Image (cartoon, coloured by chain):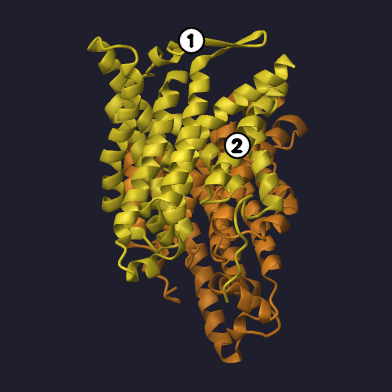
Chain colours: A orange, B yellow
Amino acid sequence: MAAALPSSAAPVSGRTDASVAHGRTVLLGLLTCAALAVAGWFAPKWLTFLVTMAAANGLVSLGIVGLMRGGVVPFGQGMMLAIGGYTAALVFNHLGVTDALGLALGGGLMAALVAAPFAPLLSRYRGIFFAMLTLALSMVTYGLLMKLDMLGGSDGFNMGRPTLLGMTLPDARVGYILYLLAIVLATVMSLLARVYFDSTRGLVTLAVRENELRVEYLGGSVRQAMTINFILAAFCGGMGGALAVMALGHIEPNFSFWTTSGEFVFVAILAGWQSVAAVFVASTVLEIVRSFSSAYFPNTWQLALGLFLLFVIRFLPKGIGSLWMKGPTR
Amino acid sequence: MAATLTILIDGLTYASWLFIVALGLTLVFGVLKILNIAHGSFYALGAYMAATFVAWGASMQWAPAFSLVAMLLAAVAVAAIVAPLTERGLLRFFYGRDEVLLVLVTYALFLILEDVTKLIWGANPYFVSEPYAMFGNVDVGIQSYVGYDFALVGLAVAVGLAVWWGLNRTRQGKIVLAVIHSAEVASSMGVNVSRVYMLAFSVGIFLAALGGAFTAPMISVQPGVSVGVVIVSFAVVIIGGLGSIEGAAIGALIVGLARSLAVHLAPVAELFAIYVVMAIVLTFRPEGLFQRIQARKI
């Protein structure tokens, strides 16, 4: 408990163990990223596309996991996906900025900016009210996007092919390069998330989930932690949206619809709140289940998804991350 | 003046079926502490079942008035078949778990039912137009309105009163209230809590299906009707305060009027007027209009 306090440092004896563990995590992350990069070169196009989308969607769910660690689940994170995606596509089409990395960061920043005024308000809510209020915000966004003709209304609009660091992307390799960008960004964000989760504020977030009144008595600011978590989640979501729109080449208001948001929560629950890597594993599992079942049984893929979700909640309540993460049982 | 009247009547019609559906949602939440995303699917099941029953009645050449009975029977059938299956077969394994996790369980149920309705009824729209013309037209001022709309308002009032009376004036209702207050204490007093859960859930599903069955004549029944309904019903019960009958009524009226105002005055705002109202209410009354303030637990 003492480690969760803002004023006190982590126990000295645990320091070296923790940094060794951190070094191992970073190394493992970089190795995985490199292995994926090599594998992607030989993989068929549909597979690299699938993993690109899984990484982009996984970023959104990563933000949700960050909030879940504090005990709240947003049911409107599709809004952040939409803001990031629309920002990237609009900046590309109207301002002539074509750099994929810049667009991804821009999408994230815009989502964080839009989320910032709502964050202090939302930090007062818990449980179902938090879920419903975020859902309401995302549906307001959905309604706006549907009706704004300058944004293409319900059809959305297309965006062209981005460049990367000044290079134009050749036809044959554009998918692979976007795949590289997606997995590199996913790796970087995962490592940053790990650092944040293990930082003092990250631990305060965990303590809020256990008992927020005690956190306040001990001098931690619950609302500050929740506010910051929400803005960070928005940044992740916006970045995911920008990556998704670059991979798809098209954006539409459905990005902000509540069923889209539901899928992100699905992935976050499937992953559990303990492991960061699990988020991307879960996101890939969802993409695989989705594309295979829509190919082989197009009329019942939601049925398959629903049964799968029930199975996970019933038999793996702490998510697939609990398979390899040791930690507190609650 | 005529425009104001139209807005009011449109809002009232919209509010009436919405109230029936939201009442089921709020009842299920009050007793079982589950915010049921699949509630919209039960609404859709009611609408589909009504389409089947009314068409069947028409093929048997029964009198048009039978279609009203058919719609009622459709709602009863949905509740009788689906409620035991979902409550006993699925939900009871998750009682006592985190509220948000339960939302996700019902989200999974929603996904499953979405495909199940498509498997049973296919993807083509159904139309149940017979009952809609049954009540003729009513002239109010210079405008003419469909009588069915007013009948629906009457039904909503009757359903609301019936549920209120059932909860507050009958022995069974008192038992339900006791379980809402504390399932544990009620159980130690000899109340069969799982039976009460079953009953409340069945009534909740019946109300959703009833709303679906009686709106079927006004809409085209097709895949996707469930998606919109459940989110609007959420808005209603959140505005009114979860678990409150009066709240559901006021919430439905607010949402109905907000929507019809938007439709008539600023069509651009139609889709999000409801959610703006909900966000505003939640900002000032975080627990909804009719919810008692609860102390935080240490």
Which residue is tagged 2?
A169
State the mark number for residue B86: none
Instruction: Report the mark closest to the observer, 2 or 1.
Output: 1
Are the residues flagged by discs 2 and 1 from a single subunit?
no
Which of B281/A258 is in front? B281
Quarter-wise, where is residue B43 in the image?
A: top left
Which of A298/B156 is in front? B156
Q: Position of residue B67 (x, y in %)?
A: 33, 18
Q: Position of residue A32 (x, y in %)?
A: 46, 61
SS class, disc 2: loop
Which of B263/B114 is in front? B263
Q: Position of residue A120 (x, y in %)?
A: 72, 58
Which residue is tagged 1?
B136
Q: Is residue B156 above or below residue B284?
A: above
Q: Is residue B105 above or below residue B272?
A: below
Residue at image point 53% right, 31% down: B16
Quarter-wise, where is residue A72 in the image?
A: bottom right
Horizontal placement of B37 versus A163: left or right?
left
Q: Is residue A39 visible?
A: no
Disc 2 chain ID = A
Please, what is the three-letter code of the amino acid marked with disc 2? Leu
Disc 1 chain ID = B
Residue closest to the far left: B60
Please, what is the three-letter code of the amino acid marked with disc 1? Gly
Q: Quadrant of the C terminus of chain B?
A: bottom right
Give the spatial CA distance, label 2 vs label 1: 66 Å
Q: Position of residue B6 (x, y in %)?
A: 66, 18
